[in-house]
Every structure is written in structure tokens, then in C-alpha cells.
Amino acid sequence: MPIRSRALVRVKKEGTPPPSVAILDTAFHRASLVTPHGDTKSARDRLRAELKVVRSSATVLRHLGLETRRFRRPPPTDFERSLVGARFGDDALDRSLLRIRRAEERIRGLAREEGRTLRGAEGPDEIGERIRSFYGRLSSFVREVDPDISRLRAIGRFLDDRPRLDPAAPTLVVAGFPNVGKSSLVARLSSARPRVADYPFTTLSIAVGHADLGFDRLQVVDTPGVLGRAGRSNSAETETTTTVRGAATVVLFVIDPSDRSEHSVAEQESLLARWRAEFPQLPFVVVETKADLARRPSENLKVSATTGEGIDTLWKAIRAHVVPSGELPPMEESIVEPESPPATPEAGPPTPKRRKRGVAVP
Ligand SMILES: Nc1nc2c(ncn2[C@@H]2O[C@H](COP(=O)(O)OP(=O)(O)OP(=O)(O)O)[C@@H](O)[C@H]2O)c(=O)[nH]1
Ligand SMILES: [Mg+2]
């Protein structure tokens, strides 16, 4: 059966076409457009075949390169890698990249070898047979990496939906049980405007806002709620734990002491105790929120995202844990390069201005 019909049969059987179908379709179409020059028909036949080999393999390689480019420039940060590892499996990204790289090497080798063999081929039948066999092998190399291309696309979409955190900037991770008021506090503390609603798991993936500490720009990360059931986390809860582990400079642990919470303070505190034991190096700032609704005697800070009560005191507690770096954040988009050199040599280099400053901290 011709290669193209075989691909169509697979599409019908499986519903969505695997990535190889479009890649090979483009490659064979582009290869069919080659226009060889030559004095004799046999010279033109051979050159046409050689050009088909070059063009089809080059097109496939260009497409495979596009599938992997997102993971090369810039490469994912360590934190992004751990998010991907938690969702897709520890080595899923590296395994797929490696398999595609191997397929690229095999395709390059195949094209080189075929170029040599074609030079010795005699007559249109032999040349036609060689091209068919080349296309068959090229197709099977691309089809073998279908699952890897699909996985890389899924990982790319997953990362596109996540903020790109600056690993060098201080990061406050806001975490706690579902529906306790984490997103409301993130909106109070930063430039982020996350969705707030009165039901659990409104937030399903991490989001970031910024706050201007004066000396540095703080990343404030909203997270999905965690129920604290050891060993039985859903993917959103796992994302939160991965973020606490991989991105936090400080954790803001939010407790809801009001009767709006379906979970007792004791339950919420047991998650806090577990995290303190799991991440002994991390500072935890603990707040009891919804202070406008309920408060109980305890040593924890009392705040309300609704009225703003306690937010100034909360900032003091957060700032105490964020060591001034004395440096501007290295994010390129946040810096406007000065246009002219300093007026006098003694004046030293001009200070770059920040464009995105986030919410100013009192
Ligand atoms: N009265 C009062 N209500 C609050 C306060 N903070 C949050 N809420 C309400 O509590 C509900 C949950 O708030 P969210 O900020 O979405 O809570 P969350 O912890 O982000 O929830 P998930 O993303 O589902 O885990 C919403 O109805 C908010 O309006 C507060 O300080 N006072
Ligand atoms: Mg939320």
C-alpha cells in the first residue's frame, strides 16, 4: 500500500492524526516539486531522485528541529523540569528529546547512504525502487517518534500555561488547604489577579504576581489547594508541593479558621507540620485569614484579604525573611537600557530603570 494511504488508514483508525502524518505529507509534497536539470532523461531521473532524498529528509529534520526547539532555547529551568517531571514522569522530557535526536541522526545517515547508492543505480525501475524504499524507511523513523513528538507538544502546552519564574528573584509561595483564601491574598499582595470563588480547587495551576520590595522584586506565587492526604495527592496538589520544594524562598501558609472552611484548623495545621518537617530549610510565615469573619486566640498573624486588616504586619513578617540582594532583577523585560552614557566618568554607570514594578509594598 502506498505510504500516504497507509497513513490515512491509521488516521481513520485512531481518530486524531499522529504528528508524523503532517510531517511526512509536507516532506513528500515538497520533494515532489523538485525540478532537475540534465542533458539526458536518465541523468534527470537520477538527479530528481537525489533531490527527493535531500529535500524530503531536510524537511523532516527541519520539522523535528521545530518540535524540540522550545526545549533548547532557552532550556527549561530546574524548577520547570521538576514541574514537568511531577506531571509527566521523571525522565519523560529527556527521554523524548534523546529519542528524537537519535531519529535525526538516523535520518541524516540514511540520506547520506541513499545519496551514495543512487549514484550507482541504473535505469528508472531501480531508481524508482530505491526512492520507494528510502521513503518507507524515512517514514518508519518518523513514526517511531510519534509518541515523543506528542509528549513534547503536551509538555510545551503545560509549560505555556505556567508562569516562567525567575530563579534568581525571591519568591513567596502562598499555599494551604483549598478555598482558604490563598488567591484573595495573592491579589492583595501582588500584581496578580487570580480567579477567586467560593469553592475548593478554583486554582488548578500555579500563577505569579509581583510586588516591589524597594530593593528587589518579589515573585508571589498562587498555588492550588492541598488536602494533605499523604500519598494520595492529585496532580494539582502535587504541583503545589513541587512549587514549595523547588521555587519558594518563603512560604506563606494560609489557615482559614472560619466556619466557611470544610477543614478544621487542626487538619490544616497538620499539613503545616508535615511541610515544616519535609522542608526544614524553608521559612514559613503562618497567617489566619478571613479575620473579618472569625478569629481565634493563637500566635498566628490575623489578616483579612477582604478588608486589608493585618496586611501591613504581614508584609513586615515576609520582608524579614527576604534578604536584600542589592541587585536589580536580571529579567531582561524588566530593565530599560539607558540610551546615553553617563554625563561624567565619575558619575559611574547609569542605573537601569525598572519597567514592571508590580505592587509597591508598604
Ligand atoms: N470574608 C472573607 N472572605 C474571604 C477572605 N479571603 C477569601 N475569602 C473568600 O473565600 C472564598 C475562597 O477564596 P479564594 O481566594 O478563591 O480561596 P483559595 O484558597 O484560593 O481557593 P482554591 O483556589 O479553591 O484553593 C472566596 O469566596 C473569597 O471571597 C477574607 O479575608 N474574608
Ligand atoms: Mg485559589
Image (cartoon, rainbow, N blue to C red):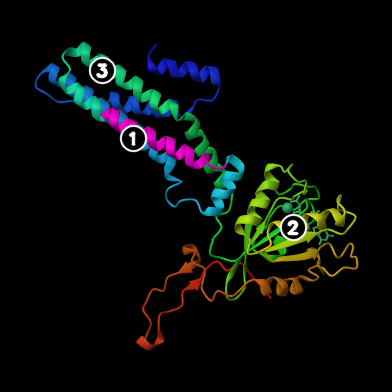
The x and y percentages for residue 208 are 62, 58
Q: Residue furthest left?
A: 39
In this rendering, the answer to whether 329 lies above or below 49 is: below
Residue that mark 2 sits on: 182
Q: Is residue 101 magenta?
A: yes
Earlier residue among tags 1 and 3: 1
Earlier residue among tags 1 and 2: 1
Inspect the image, locate mark 3, and give the three-letter code of the amino acid beneath it.
Arg
Residue that mark 3 sits on: 130
Dot 3, crowdedness within 10 Å: few (<14), some or many (≥20)? some
Q: Is mark 3 within 8 Å of ligand 1?
A: no
Q: Is mark 2 within 8 Å of ligand 1?
A: yes
Q: CA distance from mark 1 to mark 3?
A: 20 Å
Residue that mark 1 sits on: 105
Magenta stretch: dominant secondary structure = helix
Dot 2, crowdedness within 10 Å: few (<14), some or many (≥20)? many
- Point out the stretch of residues depicted in magenta: 90-111
